[in-house]
Image: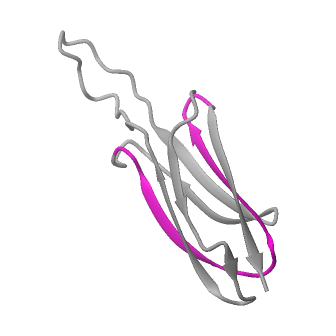
Amino acid sequence: MAQLPVRIILPSTAKKGDIIEIKTLIQHAMETGYRRDDVGKPIPRDIITTFAVTYGGVEVFKADFNQGVAANPYVAFTTIATESGELVFTWLDERGAATIERRKVTVS
């Protein structure tokens, strides 16, 4: 899969113990497999199945998607700032392809 456009919004700095909000958006058609093209041929299903986030190597968020999720899925969640480190965002599609993004947060 080609690298999909991704938007991630999170604070670059936080105080230890702060609750930080993380917002993500990935550009993806999320084709259900139920539609047909202009000549009546079924459009193959093409969806993101899993979205997971690790923080300092520990999984802090995970969502399993299905064909009912809208195109360009937006996900927002919170976590607690525990230490400076890297958040790794991973989107997997049903064909096993992955889109991975990384962001750092500095905790004081």
On-image quarter of the C terminus: bottom right
Of the pair 13 and 58, the residue shown nearer to us: 13
Whole-percent x and y of residue 29? 37, 36
Judged left or right of residue 30, residue 51 is right
Name the residue located 58 percent from the left edge and 69 percent from the top edge. 10
Judged left or right of residue 84, residue 53 is left
Name the residue located 23 percent from the left edge and 17 percent from the top edge. 37
Judged left or right of residue 73, residue 90 is right
Bounds of the magenta segment: 71-96
On-image quarter of the N terminus: top right
**Which SS does the magenta portion mostly show?**
strand
Say if the magenta span includes residue 57.
Answer: no
Whole-percent x and y of residue 77? 53, 71
The vertical placement of 28 against 10, above or below, is above
Name the residue located 57 percent from the left edge and 48 percent from the top edge. 50
| Quarter of the image where one finds residue 19 | bottom right
Judged left or right of residue 66, residue 4 is right
